[in-house]
């Protein structure tokens, strides 16, 4: 996807996206690809690390949506139970 396409889809300015994409490239999340060898236009593709990060974010959004059915009190109780289970499970962890 080019910066222009990304800007149109996200309703963001190209210069803002350019800075963000440079940071993402530096972090190994995207790869900048020249459209043709002598072209000044670039496309961006997600790297494997970028795809994994994206999938993790989607998973976290799903968990948040699922957990939203619990009231604050129920969520507190649920977390307390998970902490107890985790503490007990740690005792059986193989070293």
Image: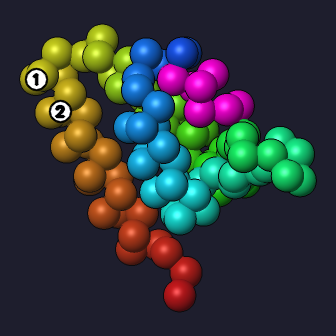
Percent across and percent down for residue 4 are 59, 25
- Which residue is at the far top? 69
**How far from the left and from the top, in percent, is residue 22?**
51, 55
Q: Nearer the viewer, residue 17 or 47?
A: 17
Q: Residues within 10 Å of mark 2 (few under 14, many from 20)?
A: few
Whether residue 91 is situated above or below residue 30 in the rendered picture: below
In the picture of the structure, the residue carrying the numbered disc 2 is: 77
Q: Is residue 91 above or below residue 58?
A: below
Question: In the image, what residue occupies the spot 42% across and 38% down?
Answer: 15
Q: CA distance from mark 2 to mark 1?
A: 6 Å
The answer to which image quadrant residue 74 occupies is top left
* Residue, far left: 73
Residue 88 is situated, as x and y percent measured from the top left of the image, at 35, 63
Give whichever of 62, 46 is nearer the camera.
46
Element at badge 1? helix
Left or right of residue 46, residue 28 in this image: left
The local crowd at label 1, few if under 14, some if 14 to 19, many if 20 or more residues have their Cα within 10 Å, is few
Residue under label 1, please give it.
73
Give percent across and percent down for residue 27: 52, 63
Do labels 2 and 1 touch, CB within 8 Å?
yes
* Residue at 15% over, 33% down: 76
> Is the magenta region chiefly helix, strand or loop?
helix
Q: How many marks?
A: 2
Which span of residues is magenta-colored? 1-7
Q: Is residue 24 left or right of residue 5?
A: left
């Amino acid at each position: 996807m080019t910066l222009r396409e990304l800007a149109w889809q996200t309703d963001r300015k190209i210069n803002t996206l350019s800075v963000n994409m440079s940071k993402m490239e530096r972090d190994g999340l995207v790869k900048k690809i020249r459209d043709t060898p002598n072209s000044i236009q670039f496309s961006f593709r997600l790297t494997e690390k970028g795809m994994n990060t994206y999938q993790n974010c989607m998973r976290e959004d799903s968990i948040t949506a699922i957990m939203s059915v619990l009231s604050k009190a129920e969520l507190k109780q649920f977390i307390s139970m998970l902490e107890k289970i985790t503490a007990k499970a740690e005792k059986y962890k193989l070293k």
